[in-house]
Image (cartoon, rainbow, N blue to C red):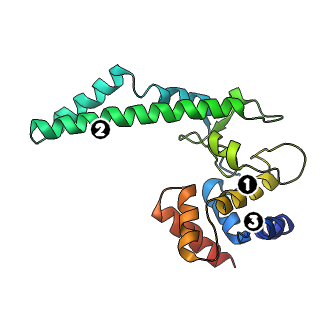
Amino acid sequence: EFLKEHESKLIEAEAKYSVPKEVIASILWIETKHGNFLGSNHIISVYLSTALANEQKYIDMNIKELEKTFEGDSSELAKLKDKIIARANKKANWALNELIALKDMKLKNVNISKLKGSWAGAFGMPQFLPSSYLKLAVDGNNDGNINLFDVDDAIFSVANYLNKNGWSEDVNKQSKAVFSYNNSADYVQAVLKLAELSK
């Protein structure tokens, strides 16, 4: 139904970005059921809470939980503690960078302070992170506004995302492009299988 309803825009995106319309439609289906399930998490809160990951009290709490179940020598435990700290710092820095990207987004008719999306901070029909929006979102209907809640912008943005991440005729490069969208082999398989069944 989605392929039929948006055929002309999907064909236009396919021609411009060399990404099959079935793949674009499959990603939009898997991400949000073509916009029917957009997520209810307050995006700013997602990033603000994640930005606290490297607060000492949370690091201490995670280390304490590790110590309860750890079986091994002290050198192994020390390495695991270092990993917890490194991961906490990485998560906090990532969240701060996404907050900066969120601030830099220019969304007309969308109040960023009320923006809702996934538990991971993704939003819109294609579930982009703010940093992905800034780099890869596209104005698919030429209205001067990139709005990922708009189906035309979502279609073009998914196509551009895959194109910029190496989509080509090569099957391995197709898998890598989809993997860049979501780091899951199961996700890649689901997208490509659904696209194949949609033809």
Task: Report whether 140 appears left or right of 24.
Answer: right
Residue type at mark 3? Tyr
Whether residue 70 is visible to the viewer of this picture, yes or no, is no
Residue occupied by mark 3 = 17
Q: How many labels does the image show?
A: 3
Q: Distance between the residues labelled 3 and 2?
A: 40 Å
Q: Quadrant of residue 82?
A: top left
Quarter of the image with the N terminus is: bottom right
* Residue toward you, 171 or 118: 171
* Label whose residue precedes the other's in the sequence (2 or 1): 2
- In the rendered structure, which amino acid carries the disc numbered 2? Lys
Q: How far apart are marks 1 and 3 (CA)?
A: 10 Å
Q: Do the residues labelled 2 and 1 touch (CB within 8 Å)?
A: no
Marks 3 and 2, the one that precedes in the sequence: 3
Q: Element at badge 2? A: helix
Residue at numbered disc 2: 83
Q: Name the residue under label 1.
A: 157
Q: Where is residue 72 in the image (x, y as percent from the top left)?
A: 10, 42
Relative side of 21 to 60, left or right: right
Q: What element carries label 1?
A: helix
Q: How far apart are marks 2 and 1 (CA)?
A: 35 Å
Q: Which residue is drawn at 47% across and 64% down?
A: 186
Q: In the image, what residue type sits under mark 1?
A: Ser
